[in-house]
Amino acid sequence: MAESTKTATLTIDGQDYELPIYSPTAGPDVIDIRKLYGQAGVFTYDPGFTSTASTDSTITFIDGGKGELLHRGYPIDQLAEKSHYLEVCYLLLYGELPSAAKLEEFESLVTHHTMLHEQMMNFFRGFRRDAHPMAIMVGVVGAMSAFYHDSTDINDPHQREVATIRLIAKMPTVAAMAYKYHIGQPFVYPRNDLDYASNFLNMCFSVPAEKYEVNPVLSRAMDRIFTLHADHEQNASTSTVRLASSSGANPFACIAAGIACLWGPAHGGANQACLEMLEEIGSVDRIPEFIERAKDKNDPFRLMGFGHRVYKNFDPRATVMKESADEVLDLLGIENNPKLQVAKALEKQALEDPYFKEKKLFPNVDFYSGIILEAMGFPTSMFTPIFALARTVGWISQWSEQLADPQLKIGRPRQLYKGETSRDYVDIENR
């Protein structure tokens, strides 16, 4: 970390303490409080860590006020328009866009590691038939450390690299098999002649009984979903991966921890919640009723898929995702899908409503990704597994960056204790 050129003075009981201030390349300055407890005997209090920088990073930057998302300095809209998912994976992992030769080599490595160990099929069959795909993914990814123990030594750079490629390559296979198991169809093995997104769609929707051709419009839309969800800075699941990693856990365990955290409806389940809301609305003629409910402060109902906790203006990913949603709906149509009809009408009415304009409650990436996945034929139970598939590279990039950090130490948040103080044990007959 660079030397501090500024300080902040904190006064406690008449005693002054000088705290270094560091300036990032982008974003607000940070006050270094690492020595505060040792010097002053106090902790800071920040529930949810919403005002705390837990690390320094060079991977992703978000400016919520401007609606800006940068990967290694490149705007997400440019990457989504001009690049593709595996190139973005390379960028996140290695810091620069690859040459044509480097990209071809990377894509070949990923393509030739998509198969799962055949004995892992027993893990899928051990789950109940109605198991949620996310439950299957948490279990199977965690179990990968038992099958690929030649890439679990985090102190070996080669093993870290092998684990990285394996996770990126095999996650679509795991997600697709979880889906096939969920719906009672036979597993479909990966194909080396297909690109990353097309291979995933083929594993999800092809069946042995007939030939399946991946539509390029759907493949491009899926690739954009992967790209737009690849990384999002120090969110809950990424922080979970980093915290697990700080203990020295193997990479498969760390990614399984990230998947478990992403499963929470407040995090990775937002696009699923959006589709469930559309189902609740039911029909286009009921939209005004629900818009009025969303405006009522005394009504707990919220329009899911509108606005964003981080982006206070607009979600930069949503513009690109809307283009893909329009392309997919033009291809597949919405005539026979009431939820998609409601989605398009709700989007139009909300964007024209002064209340939503004033509050800057624009449709976000979850709104449009949910529409696309619904139109493709995925059940809502698969929305979060697809999110986990896409976010794997972000988790691995953050994991790899943390392991190379000379300041790395095991995470250990403190607390504001408000429980009982020391008490003597009372024998049971005297209570």
Image (cartoon, helix red, strand yellow):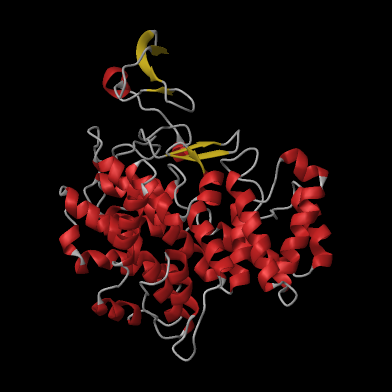
Residue 147 is left or right of residue 205, and the answer is left
Is residue 253 shown to the viewer in this render?
A: no
Q: Residue at x 61, y 51 (%)?
A: 320
**Residue beneath the point at 74% across and 62% down:** 344
Asked where in the image residue 34 lies, by quadrant, the reply is top left
Question: Viewed as shown, does residue 274 lie left or right of 382?
Answer: right
State which quadrant residue 325 falls in. bottom right
Residue at the spot 44% in from the left edge and 79% down from the top edge: 180
Total labels drawn: 0
Residue 216 spot, x, y in % from top left: 55, 68
Is residue 108 or residue 189 the one in the foreground? 108
Give the percent coordinates (x, y) of residue 399: 31, 47
On the image, the x and y values in percent for residue 419 come to 38, 40
- On the question of residue 97 being in view, the answer is yes
**Above or below: residue 67 compared with residue 338:** above
| Vertical position of residue 299 compared to residue 216: above or below | above
Q: In which quarter of the image is the N terminus?
A: top left
Nearer the observer, 321 or 100: 100
Q: Is residue 186 left or right of residue 291?
A: left
> Where is 153 relative to 424, above or below?
below
- Residue 391 in the image: state x and y as whole percent: 43, 55
Of 54 and 104, which appears nearest the observer?
Answer: 104
Of all residues shown, which one is farthest toward the front?
101
- Residue at the location (77% across, 49% down)? 351
